[in-house]
Amino acid sequence: MANAEHSGRPAEAFGSTAADTARTRLRVARLGLWLVAAVLAVRQVAVVLGTPRGERLTDLETWVGPNGVLHVNGSLYDSTRFTGTPFGGLVLKPLTRAAEQALGWGWTFGTLLLVAALGLVVARALPQPVSRRTALLAAPVAISLLMLSLPVRNTLWLGQTSIIPVLLVLLGCFVVRDWRVAGALIGLAAALQPTVLLFAALLWFTGRRRAAAATGASFTAVTALAWAAMPHDSYTYWVHHMAGVGLGGEADALANQSLHGALLRLGFSGPLEIGLFLSLGAAVAALGVRRSVRYARDGQLLLAVALTGCAAIVVSPTTWQHQLLWVLLAVVGQVGKRASDRYVWPVAVILVMTLPAKMMLPNMAALYPLRDNAVLLAAVAAATVVPFLARTSPYYRTPIPTEYARPVPTRWKHVPLLPFPKRVLTRPNLLLELLLIRVTYAAYQQVRLGATGGTNTGGRARAEDHGRQILDIERFLHIDIEHWANQAVVKVGWLRDFFDFYYESFHFVVPLSVLALLYWRRPVDYRWARSSLGFATLLALVGFWLYPLAPPRLMPNLGVIDTVHGVQDFSEPDYGTLTALTNQYAAMPSLHFGWSLWCGLVIAIVAPKWWMKALGLLHPFFTVSAIVATGNHWVLDAAGGALVVGGGFGLSYLLMGPRARFATATAVTRAAEPAVPERDPAPR
């Protein structure tokens, strides 16, 4: 035993086993990510090719449709929707016959190959040095994000070519070494999307002046070639329409995420709008290229390319949704000195580029300018103000670590706990929390509505049948008090008004207030409480999906009066004024009661004084009284709400361990914090 100990063989064997285990896990993770990318690709193809021919690849119809380029004998722009450059028409017109022979299949699979190539180039272009794990996992992650992004999905759906210029630029910047070929590729991209010429400035100021000159020369050559072959079309595009302005849809349409489109949507027009567009666009272009040059010299060329592309989005007169991939590439930039803040920028970019703007911001008129220009604002922010860290910053590789609480022993020894993450002592990033809460609630609304196929008509019969089942169970248990309580409250005006107000107002105000107070005063408890609420809501969504249930107010012949929404017209398939907005059959379990019970329990657990605990527990009592008296829920719905809340707390216990009553930082964590200077030398 002593000989073995001195020889070191057991330690070597242990180290070898640990390394083998790590490699195995990495291979499994990589395989899983590639599988996810493949599933997403198959899903996108299925969506496109499963759509009727007249509704898919509508932009491809500009080539092969009855009024498309293929069948137009005169100008390219005599067709209904063609908005490309004359060079694009010159190159793509010979391909339209083949596209007509197999509309969709070749174009769709060819686009998928372009997306895969784009993801591989992006993964290869990450700033060095990168860990082996990052190098192995970057490609499938990049391809998956591209597949999920709105620009790629729109490109596949519309049959567009907007991925080609992005890929040509990346090939010219990262793959091709010969300056002539690199310049030619970027020049070809500019011939398809003229604002790509902004990359010539990036090449010039980063020392690749011959490549910049080759870019300008190739752009000029192919544009001149198109002018010689199609002089009338070239004049129409470059002179009459001023580089494509006015072609396609209306310039103030929401799909046009350029500065020009935003100014038109804000009500500017005429010389004032043109002056603002030219001056602001020039400022964004100059600042964006300046920042891009600095990050390129810092060794972050992929970030520099992304920022230049974001500036090109802003200064283009028309930037349609399928042309916005540059914003997604900006996800590679690192923002924040603290490790806990590193996720804010990538999460924000991914949400903006993968979800509709309506899921990002509430449906409020005051927020329409932000919601309608979400992608444009992200591009402007990336190009001009987001403080990306330089690789020379001490925080780039070693951010300020997160403080963790000491492990808490389990309270119930017979409950097996999963490996749970350590508790974080500091507050989570507020912007990230607000984004996630908003997106989660928007997804919650979509799932509620999707449970009945998007309309209440589809789920009405089943929901009413379930309502009769619930009523029979309550009668058996002698708890069918809904009709009695409703009629009693209707007869007392002030009591009816009180319950109506309580039902409509406190459902969101109290949970948000509890979360805000915990976030500010008790961040460790905030994470525990927020996770419990999230798990409870997810469990409730399962109930909405599996068991659509008509509330008492929507049950025919029951005689329950809807005191909140008004009298219901049962002769209409979608009766009720709010049925078009949400799923009215998401009654079991009651999240009105569930969220109020969560509030009461959290207050009772964390409040320091007995009277605070008592007030907290009064909230679920008033809520259950309101939901029953107003006819919006059955008594058993409240029982279901209590069940999912208990499940939420249980899942938090299994995944995060028991709640820590007293959280203190570990000495190891504090000792690991590096001494860093106060000033950050990141480029501005």
Image: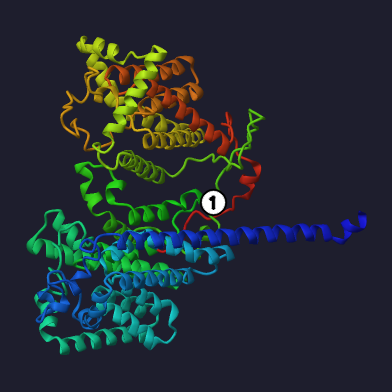
Nearer to us in this view, 649 or 542? 542
Would residue 406 appear left or right of 66 to someone viewing this image? right
Residue 482 is at least partly visible in this image: yes
Q: Picture coordinates of residue 181 (x, y %)?
A: 38, 86
Query: In this figure, which colouring scheme has been used for the structure?
Result: rainbow
**Which residue corresponds to mark 1?**
400
Examine the rendered structure and indicate whether residue 500 appears above or below residue 495: below
Q: Nearer the viewer, residue 394 or 79?
A: 79
- Secondary structure of the residue carrying tag 1 is loop
Q: Residues within 10 Å of mark 1 (few under 14, many from 20)?
A: many
Q: Which residue sits at x=26%, y=33%?
A: 460
**Quick check: can you spot residue 333?**
no
Quarter occupied by the N terminus: bottom right
* Quadrant into which the C terminus falls: bottom left
- Height in image: 406 above or below 558? below
Q: Is residue 680 above or below residue 613?
A: below
Residue closest to the far left: 270
Query: Is 330 in front, or is 45?
Result: 45
| 51 lies above or below 218 | above
**Looking at the image, which residue is at 37% across and 37% down?**
545
Position in image of residue 490 (x %, y %): 21, 13
Residue at the (25%, 50%) spot, across then down: 370
Q: Amino acid at mark 1?
A: Ile
Nearer to the camera, 79 or 531: 79
Q: Position of residue 501 (x, y in %)?
A: 25, 21
**Residue 365's image quarter?**
top left
The image position of residue 565, as x and y in percent, is 20, 26
